[in-house]
Image (cartoon, helix red, strand yellow):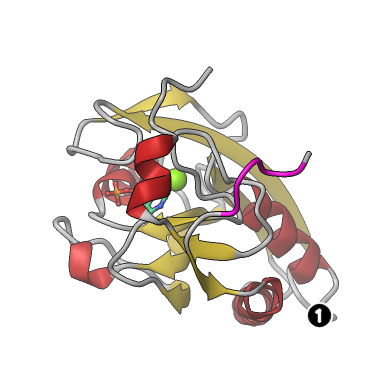
Amino acid sequence: MIESRAPGRLIYTPGEIADAVGKLALRIAWDYRRKPLVLLGVLKGALYLTVDLARAIAQIADGPSEIVVDYLCVGSYGMSDRSDGQVRLLMDASVQVTNRDVVLVDDIADKGYTLGFLQTLLKERAPASLRTCVLFDKPSARVVEVPLEYVGLPAPDAFVVGYGLDYQERFRSLPYVAAIDPKTKEESSSPST
Ligand code: IMP
Ligand code: MG
């Protein structure tokens, strides 16, 4: 399915994204070498990242002894492009994380509400260890300080879409990342179905 409109200013090409994912995979594979690893992706934004990361880690020699991939889904109240700190769990992971080494994988750290919420939730389940991996980081937007052990690339102080990141459910499947054009954003603001 081809996106109806390619928005905005190009920020990262597919090649740059693949390089960043590869580098994250190398670091994670090394840190969890010969140990079982649980990768927990945050839907929907980290859908592609989690899959690409898991496959890249699995191809690295002497990496984790086993990779278990699971997802959970969170939503925030209010507009889909604005989080106001009210994060809720829409779907929980099905794997048990207690006593296991877990890496939480999300698309972007923005205000920090989502990752703060999930880190607290997961820590209550007493994993052996918990680290967080994001492909993009927008440090200038941070409201809640959250530890981020693995960061792929800086994101500009703009709304970005592509490679999992959406604007009202659109543009997720773009293979590149673009900063959204305010005009496009306005034109596409009809309710998503
Ligand atoms: P936070 O709770 O403010 O850190 O927001 C995190 C979530 O909001 C991310 O997991 C994304 O799903 C979404 N988000 C934040 N910034 C952007 C953006 O620039 N583009 C698309 N989604 C974003
Ligand atoms: Mg997200």
Pointer 1: residues within 10 angstroms few (<14), some, or many (20+)? some
Q: Quadrant of the N terminus?
A: top right
Question: Which residue occupies the foreground of this view, 69 or 14?
Answer: 14
> How many callouts does the rendering have?
1
Examine the structure image and report whether residue 10 is included in the region drawn in magenta: no
Residue occupying image coordinates x 81% and y 78%: 60
Amino acid type indicated by mark 1:
Asp
Residue positioned most to the left? 143
Q: Position of residue 124 (x, y in %)?
A: 33, 39
Residue occupying image coordinates x 43% and y 46%: 184
Question: Which residue occupies the foreground of this view, 119 or 8?
Answer: 8
| Ligand 2 within 8 Å of the CB at mark 1 | no
Q: Place residue 151 in its image quadrant.
A: bottom left
Question: Which residue occupies the foreground of this view, 190 or 87?
Answer: 190
Q: What secondary structure is the magenta-colored segment mainly?
A: loop
Examine the structure image and report whether residue 3 is included in the region drawn in magenta: yes
Region in magenta = 2-6
Q: Position of residue 68 (x, y in %)?
A: 72, 48
SS at mark 1 in the image: loop
Q: Position of residue 170 (x, y in %)?
A: 54, 38
Q: Which residue is tagged 1?
A: 62
Q: As displayed, is residue 183 above or below residue 57?
A: above
Residue occupying image coordinates x 71% and y 78%: 15
Q: As displayed, is residue 111 above or below residue 177?
A: above
Residue 148 falls left or right of residue 52: left
Q: Place residue 49 in its image quadrant.
A: bottom right
Residue 182 visible in the displayed image: yes
